[in-house]
Amino acid sequence: MFVRIMAICLWIIVSSIAPVRELKPVFGLQIRHFQGAKMHSFVAFIDNGVQLTYKKILTDDDFVKFASGHWPSIYNPQRINLFDENEVGCGMFKDSFLLKAVPYCFPIDSLWKVRFSEYPFKGKSEGGWSGDYNKPSLRQAKFLGENYLVKNVDNDYFLDTNLWKILRDVRDPVWIENYNALR
């Protein structure tokens, strides 16, 4: 009995002085071919300091609404405009005709080009920036790994700061030229 009481007291003392981990929302992006015509997927996690939990797959509109702070969620509880904070040209536009807020995010339209050399579906003749048809060249893959921590485009996410960085970069003509040169 004495040992149990001592163990409980020790647990109370240790747990009271152990650092409390602040939960941090983390957004991510994966660029790969998904079911249908999707070539990317947004995701939201909660980082508890040990692992990423509470994974939620987001549509493009959901991502913009959560990240802009337009919608309340556990992934942006203070409703901070993360696009403004990270200098990414996305957000909510107040449509004066429809009288409602409409999500926009121009970088999303270019994300497929990081992975594909040609638009993989009928209807677009626009070229991508990838060195191979459906994946980055070896030099491009190395570049993505070194600069965005994406070692494998089939499995890894552009997470947290790397998400915001790639969303800025796909709109930068100098970055596009440099990425193309790695073919």
Image: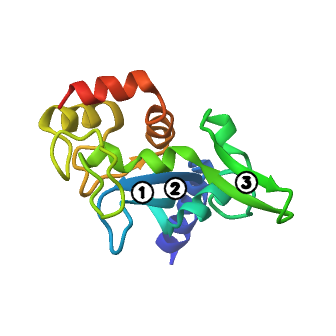
Q: Position of residue 88 (x, y in %)?
A: 59, 37
Name the residue carrying label 1.
51
The Cα atoms of the two marked residues, 2 and 3, are separated by 21 Å
Q: Residue 87: which quarter of the image?
A: top right
Q: Position of residue 5 (x, y in %)?
A: 55, 71
Q: Can I make out residue 104 in this image? A: yes
Is residue 96 or residue 88 the one in the foreground?
96
Q: Residue at x 16, y 31 (%)?
A: 139
Q: Is residue 84 left or right of residue 27?
A: right
Name the residue carrying label 2.
48
- The amino acid sitting under disc 2 is Asn
Sooner in the amino-acid sequence: mark 2 or mark 3: 2
Q: Residue at x 20, y 53 (%)?
A: 134
Is residue 57 or residue 10 the one in the foreground?
57
Label 1 with label 2: CB-CB less than 8 Å: yes
Q: Residue 97: which quarter of the image?
A: bottom right
The Cα atoms of the two marked residues, 1 and 2, are separated by 6 Å
Mark 3: which secondary structure?
loop
Mark 2: few/some/many CA within 10 Å (<14, 14-19, 20+)? some
Name the residue carrying label 3.
69
Label 2 with label 3: CB-CB less than 8 Å: no
Is residue 121 or residue 68 the one in the foreground?
121
Q: Position of residue 124 (x, y in %)?
A: 36, 56
Sooner in the amino-acid sequence: mark 3 or mark 1: 1
User: Which colour assignment does the render follow?
Assistant: rainbow
